[in-house]
Structure formats: C-alpha cells, structure tokens
Image (spheres, rainbow, N blue to C red):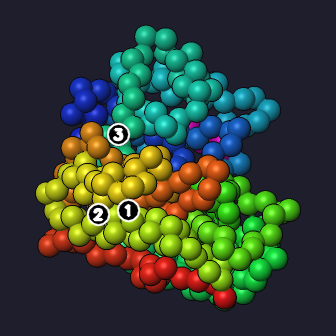
Amino acid sequence: MTDKLDALRAIAKKMSLDAIAIVPGANFQRIFGADFHQNERPLMVLVPVDGTPSAIVPNLELGSFAAIDFDGEVYDWKDQTGYQSAFDAMFEKTSIQSIGVEGQSMRVFVHHAIAKSKPSLAIADAQREIASLRLVKSDQEIAALRKAISVSENALAKTIDAVKVGMTEKDIESSLIQNLYGSGADDLSFSPIVACDSNSAKPHASARDDVPVKPGDALLIDFGAKVDGLCADITRTFFIQHCDDRSRAIYETVLQANLAGIASVVPGATAADIDDATTRVLEASAYADRIHHKTGHGLGREVHEDPYIMRGNDEKLQAGMVFTIEPGLYQLDDFGVRIEDDILVTETGAESLTSFDKQLTLIA
C-alpha cells in the first residue's frame, strides 16, 4: 500500500499541499485495483504527505473495501445517520491545512462535506497532476487495451457483414452491441455512435430508429469495448453500395490526415506536433471548412483522458502513452467522415493498436 500511495504524496509535496484526496474513478482504480461506483454514498481516501492515510467508507461497502488491503484508519457511516459525521471525525483528527482533489471526479456535495468539516481548509484542483500518473500505461494495461481493441474489431466485422439497405441506425447499433458482448467485452467504453447520411455530420450523433440506411449513404460507426478496465475507441466510416467522386475525395483527405498524424508520432514530439501534422492535411484541402475538432485524446481507463492531442498542448510524448488519432470532416446538411485509430507511443515511434482496414469500403 505504501508504494501505491507514495506517488500521491509526491504530488502533494510538489504542489505544496498537505494531502491528496481521491474518490472512486479511474485514478482510484489504477492505484487500488478496485472499482467502486460513484453514487449518492460518498467514499474518499485521504493521503497525507506525512502520517497515516484515512478513508470515508459507506458501511455497506466495508466488506468490499477490506479487499484492497487499506493500511489506514477507516471512518464508516450508515444511511440512517448520514455521512457528515464521518467527514467531521476524519478532519477533526488531522492537522492538515490544504488538500488537492480530482476536479473532474469529485462531486460538489463531497467537496461541501469536506469544507463544512474544516472551513479553513484550502482545497486545490490537482486533477491534472493526479491523472498524470496514468499517462504511461503499464504492460498489463497495454495487454488489456490490445484485447479490448481485438474484441471491438471482431464485433465491427460481424456487424458490417450483416448491414443491409433498409436497416435503421438503431438496428445496426443493437447488432453492434450484441456483437461486442458476444466477442468478449466486459462493458462498453461508451454508448456507440451509429450514424448515416446527414446524421454522420454530427460528431456525437445518436442512433435513430426511423431512418433506414440507403444506397450512397455514409455510415459512421464510433464505438469501443471495455476489457479488464481498459477502453477501446475506434471509428470507421463506410459507404452503402456506392460512393460518388466528391465523397471519395473527402474520405481520402481524412485518411491521409490520419496517416500523417500516425507518421508524426515519436517520443519527444509534442501533442501539438501531432495535431499540426494531422490538421495541416485537412486545412490544405478543399474541405477545410468542414474541420470541427482536435485530432485526439488519451485512452486508457477512461475513454477520454490525458494527453489531449491538440494545438496548444506542448506536453511531450513518452513511450507507453496511448491516444487516438481521429481526424474528421463534417458538414451538417451533407455527411461526415471520421477515421480513428488507437496509437501506442513506442521507444522509436508509434504502433497502431487498431488494425481494421481503413481503405474506403463499400457495404454491398
């Protein structure tokens, strides 16, 4: 347990804080190897720079919490009495004056319970620093990512083989979800995006149950399986039966941007460098007005995490980082194309963990 928590202590020291507080989520799972759901019952671990860690745990979770072999003091609470007394007891026993929290994970009511227990406590957002512990993936995490991607690609192949003119987006989405679980997914990385025709021009479209796919449609599918706590995230765009020259040109532009981005990945390059290499291809085309988002995002225990592949992010790439490269071109009254791969930074360059064919494919 000490080794697991030393990284949090180091963050607190670097930020001149007395302690770090973490709540259930990706960081908690990485450190403790356990997954507790965020719900109306707060659970929190407090790790001081010096001294013994402590935890606030709902009484009904004590059995599950014991499995993480926590070497610290536990303040449990019951629904009948509420959680505030547990926070009061924890902070009454500590002399800490400042803590860092996960700004994107800690909910407001937990923050308020802390502040109520110790009004003088300084609370800082340490989200980026804590999340940085997950930037470089372990061998075990990379193996899980490979498995999640393999499961995803197998499911996509089965789904595409069954697509027929007249099926709705919802029909295809349902088939995809069944195939994901049938191929070995523990869960979905996120709700799949299945969009055809003009709906494909919405990067985060919802599948419709009243619009059938028809010849000439673009069909965009963005999805991923979760396996052993790690998320795949893949996008491919297909065309139904045929594709006109303009659609083909737009697709090829996105494909060349995708390939240029992957080719630019080397340790020491920055996230901004990768976005530049990718986006310049789109900007140099006749379709630059269809650009609507950055190149990609980190991938791991969360489907969106650091590093974000975008201009302005000068964070240098390190071997073991995993992120997406997913250029896209979209026009709302027309259609959209996105091609997304999951990329591992190696000691010498990049490895695409995704291998599903990216050449323009017509679904017969």
Mark 3 packing: few (<14 Cα in 10 Å), some, or many (20+)?
A: some
Label whose residue precedes the other's in the sequence (1 or 3): 3
Going by the numbered disc 3, the residue's amino acid type is Arg
Q: Secondary structure at mark 1?
A: strand
Residue shown at 81%/64% (left/top)? 211
Q: Is residue 162 among what the camera can see?
A: yes
Say above or below: 300 vs 97.
Answer: below
Going by the numbered disc 2, the residue's amino acid type is Gly
User: What is the spatial separation of the Cα atoms under label 1 and label 2, in whole angstroms?
Assistant: 7 Å
Residue identifier under label 1 = 325
Going by the numbered disc 1, the residue's amino acid type is Ile
Q: In this rendered view, identify the residue nearer to me: 248 or 75.
A: 248
Q: Residue furthest right?
A: 210
Residue identifier under label 3 = 128
Asked if the residue under mark 2 is in contact with the one under mark 1, i.e. CB atoms within 8 Å, the reply is yes
User: What is the spatial separation of the Cα atoms under label 2 and label 3, in whole angstroms?
Assistant: 25 Å
Magenta residues, start to end: 55-59
Instruction: Tell me residue 141's x, y (percent).
Output: 39, 70
Residue identifier under label 2 = 261
User: What is the spatial separation of the Cα atoms under label 1 and label 3, in whole angstroms?
Assistant: 21 Å
Say above or below: 303 vs 15.
Answer: below
